Amino acid sequence: MKIVNRWWHQRWAPLSVLILMSLIMIVPQLLTGSTIVGSDGIFHFNRIYDAAKQISNWNFSYFQTNYGFQQSGRIVNAVYGPYFAYLTGFLLVIFRSWYHFQLVTTFAVYLIGGWGMYRLTRIAGAHRGAGLITALIFMNVGWLPRWGFNQNMNGIGAALMPYVIACGIQMVHDQVRPIHIVQLTLIMSVLIETHVLSTLMAVILLVPFWIVGMWRSDHRLLMIRNTAIAIGLTLLLTANVWGGMLSLYANNSLALPHSFQLAQNTLHITKLMDHRDSISIYLIIIFIWQVGLLLWHRRQVTRINWMISGLGIIFLWLTSRFFPWQTVNHAIPVLSQVLQFPVRITIVAYPLLLCGLALSLSLPTKLPQGKDLMLPIMILAVLAVAVPNITNISQRSEQVQHRKVLKNFGGLLLLDNSPKVLRKTLNSKHPGALLELAEKHSSDYLPINGKQGEGQQNPGSIYKRQILLGHQFFSFTVLSHGRLELQWHADNKGWQMTPVVSYHDSTLTLNGKKLAKSEYRRTHINVPIVYAHKGTNKLIIRYATPTWVGVLIGASLASWFGLGCYGLYEFRKRCGLRRIELEH
């Protein structure tokens, strides 16, 4: 017992537990050698693979996709987490196979989310034990495990959300300096460079904290000034994202994601498993436990606990069928394509409620022998959510080894559905092999002429017919300066549809001649139809990045470099202060 107590009082003790839990999560995959590919896996694997090939070949194309997405030239990364794509692409270059890449990134997401949740509870004022317990619960529920299961980007957003809430709590707690400029700027910039929808939720979440902080602050003008500085720095760091978006959306009509009925994508209750669109009875009991503790200790509960728990309950209500989503769907139909699933809001609700639980568990209990009972209850709460989650990972890992290698076949064109072949590509040191067999026909960010159709006229269906079913008849060569060359043989001269996507700023050169827009035709998704001559034809497509967008990308990179230098300076400064303290 003395050894345990001595270990627990070490600063790194909670971190070691979180590392252990993160390792346990990937043990089933380590034992089976399985790579779990979910509903969004192929889409994001294409993004990551394209970035990895750019890095390994040192041939960068910020907008035009020259390696992923069947070398179709479509634009995705520039408007969807560009720096995240390059970061994960760099990891793929290092670890080479999708299997090793997934092990590392899944472990990292679990650990980042768990550590963020623990630090949030400590900043809020919870005890170490209570904070650790709620962090372990958080790692096993909601969207956080979804990166490993389905490669949903909401899983990354869920991992980062506790850091956002921590900034909100500082706005309320710290009356002298409610806005910590660097911390707020950094987390919001990372979110924008990762997942814009999670960023919008984070902004909405921070508004009530900012209002309360402004009301409580003794230096309101300073708070307004620091907020403006944080916003300005965030805009500078993420200039590449909003610059790219402004350029694309100003000159192109881009397809929206697939539409879903909001009312049909709310939380429903399950007995055991906690999935992205369900909440287990055990997690409901945990949240009821938090509400019960609030009411039982109502005179001792801090204002911050009431606030974050109240916000958590409101956001959880938004994810349920009790909120009038049918009415909202009719009033604001675009939400069915932008938000798609109200269950996504749990990335905000869960960390709020669990942080409140940590604060409530840190209060002195009124019950006799309450302290002796509390520890086993908390351990049971962790096991209640961790065991089903780990069981789910184990079952999915086993499925990969037997029959169902790819979990979701919706939106996929499989050129070879042999489980043995698919498993081989997932473990291959040539990650592009998987993307040659499993092709995703999603409509995200495709440029469209006219209205976005439905059914067979949906941009995704057209993409399947015009790109996926035709690209194997062409040869592709990636040239310098972000150019992509297509080559094919024509038996007769005439109009030829080419399996690439063109945008307003795309330039086409056919057989050495640069084409004016009037010299070629375009389909509904802007696939070029050019007039080919008999014999061998070569078409070079290149996205001409507007000068002002290039300047913004350069400003963003310079800003991140400057922030890194500042972080290094602060780190060395703190190390120097610690050395002085030790010497004295």
Image (cartoon, rainbow, N blue to C red):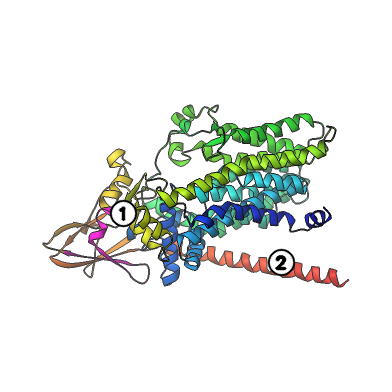
Task: Return the residue nearer the eye: 536 or 366.
Answer: 366
The local secondary structure at tag 2 comes to: helix
Q: Is residue 97 visible?
A: yes
- The percent coordinates of residue 260 (x first, y second) are 42, 36
- The percent coordinates of residue 493 (x first, y second) are 12, 62
Quarter of the figure with residue 579: bottom right
Task: Return the residue nearer the eye: 276 or 304.
Answer: 276
Q: Residue at x 58, y 64 (%)?
A: 560
Q: Quadrant of the C terminus?
A: bottom right
Q: Quickly name the residue at label 2.
A: 570
Q: Residue at x 32, y 47 (%)?
A: 448
Q: Is residue 141 visible?
A: no
The tag earlier along the polypeptide, 1 or 2, is: 1
Kind of residue at disc 1: Asp
Residue 315 as seen in the image, left or right of residue 72: right
Kind of residue at disc 2: Glu
Cα separation between marks 1 and 2:
53 Å
Residue 464 as seen in the image, left or right of residue 3: left
- The percent coordinates of residue 135 (x first, y second) are 67, 47
Task: Return the residue nearer the eye: 496 or 298.
Answer: 298
Residue 471 lies in the magenta-colored region:
yes
The residues colored magenta run 467-489
Q: Is residue 563 above or below residue 349?
A: below
View extreme (left): residue: 492
Q: Residue 218 — which label?
A: none
Q: Quickly name the residue at label 1.
A: 416
Q: Is residue 439 above or below residue 552?
A: above
- The percent coordinates of residue 11 (x first, y second) are 77, 58
